[in-house]
Image (cartoon, grey):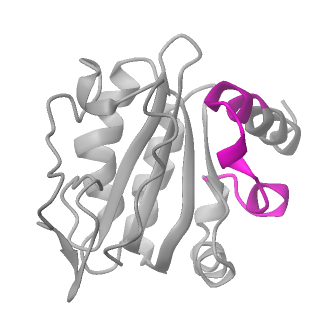
Amino acid sequence: MHTIEPYYNWRNLYIASEDPKSPFFGYENSEVYFTDQIYNYLIHPQWDNFGSETLYLKVLYSDYNLGFAIIEFLGEWNDLLSNDIMTLKRDMIELMIGEGINKFIFICEQVFNFHSDLDSVDYYEEWQDELEEGWIAVVNTREHVLAEMEKFGIDQYLVMGGKLNDISWRTKHPKMLFGQIDGLVLKRLGW
């Protein structure tokens, strides 16, 4: 786990810790010390801690004019035991919505497990209601994670699966990626 780094080829375009509108403004990552872990596994120090014990993230890009953010995740998304969605929504997403972000692209290749319960689904519904013309797209999710999300009906609030599960996102400029995903989402939603 300690060798899995967040994607860094867009750092010349955007760094969340240097963005005054970002929830991670001023956040400092160690360049050499491994300070965070998921269970007994140390993780690369460039991942950002938003308050979960098992899920870390990196805001790879935000565009306030177009109103979108691209966020990469690592770990286990656990709404059952640690209510990760509540922590994510309250401590991070609400701040981003306040700055005009209403379209979220979640890169979930490194989300290894997902656990939910019926109570946590309310946070997804609340989040979707707050987005008005926005959306939440989940990209490149592992099949068993997708199945677990669908089992609890979270796919009602997040756009996922299908062509969104086969996106070569690393080869694109973030605005091109947004355009591609926006087109897929709008087609899926019938807007």
Q: Is residue 146 left or right of residue 120?
A: right
Which quadrant of the figure has residue 24?
Answer: top left
Task: Judge whether residue 23 is colored magenta.
Answer: no
Q: In this view, does 4 lie to the left or right of 88?
A: right
Q: Which residue lies furthest to the front in this view?
A: 32
The quarter of the picture where the N terminus appears is bottom left
The quarter of the picture where the C terminus appears is top right
Q: In this view, does 76 lie to the left or right of 162?
A: left
**Residue range of the region highlighted in magenta in the rendering:** 158-179
Residue 160: x and y, percent? 70, 58
Residue 88: x and y, percent? 31, 51
Residue sitting at x 14%, y 52%: 30
Residue 34: x and y, percent? 15, 67
Q: Which residue lies furthest to the top in this view?
A: 65
Q: Is residue 55 left or right of residue 107?
A: left
Residue 123: x and y, percent? 40, 54
Residue sitting at x 66%, y 25%: 175
Instruction: Reply above or below: 180 against 149.
Output: above
Front residue of 43 and 68: 43
Front residue of 139 and 171: 171
Residue sitting at x 45%, y 44%: 8
Instruction: Reply above or below: 121 against 171.
Output: below
